[in-house]
Amino acid sequence: MSLETAFEIGQAGLQIKRIADILSASQKDIFVRLPGLLAYFPMGIRRENGIVGDHTGSGLILSQTGVCPTGYDGNSFLHLGDGVNYLQSSYVAFGLTGLETWITSSMRGLTIGGWFMIDSTPSLNSGLVSKDGIVTNRGYALWYTPGGAGGFSVSSNGSAWFSVNSGSIPTGQWRFIVGRFTPSTELAIFADGDKSVNTTAIPSSNNVPTQTFEIGRYFNDDNRIIHGKARDVFVCAAALSDALIEEIRVTSTP
């Protein structure tokens, strides 16, 4: 074998290894492997026009309102707030009832969340992940309160509202915040492993509003834009188990 041929084979082998490493990393990525995963936004995949890309292959994208700069501290993230800056999408796919038939019946529900760093306490409940509007147009929402806690809600019919609040979530620190809806059973919110629940009169499904899906804003209201950072935001049309939610948190800790 000539030296030139050996070099070419070596180069080809190196490229194959790089591809294999990329595939291996993707297979190990716990977010990509979540059951019922509808969308996953690591907040590092963007196009030139500022569109934020999904990492599941679904083709769902988020458009920026304002400018949400990209940052990196060992993990990619986007800055939210700092003016009228948030992410939104009008895709019908985000309208989840919690009873999607493409999910096995024992796992049906809704789980949304991700890693957030809140820069400052808002004066009104402000949005983390939501598809929720005014009364008669309510859906699901994960938010941060003026009291420094998280909140999660679903609506049975667009008007009736069921919610649960977390314990204190400090500003200036990355926190894993997740809301889970288990139809007819429980609303739960997880804040860095601490779980709070509401089991009172939980509805059998979630209403699908016409309001857009939003990250960083709530209630279709520019006064409810969160000031902070977000990464690894996900939406699942399944009620993920406590153990899996904890595994996600531990595996993806910044």
Image: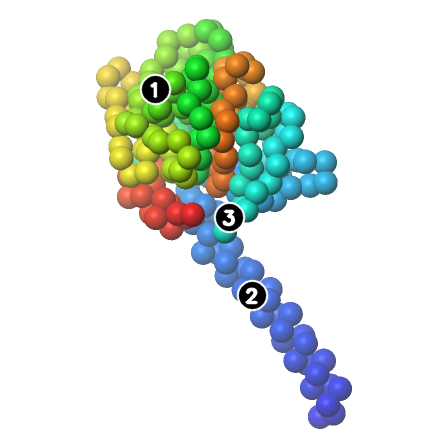
For this orientation, the residue located farthest to the left is 200
- The answer to which of 125 and 160 lies nearer the viewer is 125
What residue is disc 3 on? 73
Q: Residue at x 64, y 70 (%)?
A: 15
**Numbered label attached to residue 20:** 2
Q: On screen, 29 above or below 54?
A: below
Q: How is the image coloured?
A: rainbow
Q: Residue at x 60, y 21 (%)?
A: 84
Q: Amino acid at mark 2?
A: Ala
Q: Is residue 65 visible?
A: yes
Q: On screen, 124 above or below 62?
A: above
Q: Residue at x 54, y 60 (%)?
A: 23
Quadrant holding the N terminus = bottom right
Q: Earlier in the sequence, mark 1 or mark 3?
A: 3
Q: Residues within 10 Å of mark 2 (few under 14, many from 20)?
A: few
Q: Is residue 183 visible?
A: no
Assign a secondary structure to mark 3: loop
What residue is disc 1 on? 147
Q: Residues within 10 Å of mark 3 (few under 14, many from 20)?
A: few
Q: Earlier in the sequence, mark 1 or mark 2?
A: 2
Q: Amino acid at mark 1?
A: Gly
Separation of disc 1 and disc 3 at Cα?
Answer: 28 Å
Q: Position of residue 138 (x, y in %)?
A: 46, 13
Assign a secondary structure to mark 2: helix
| 5 left or right, relative to 95 | right
- The answer to which of 233 and 119 lies nearer the viewer is 119
- Between disc 3 and disc 2, the foreground one is 3
Q: Earlier in the sequence, mark 3 or mark 2?
A: 2
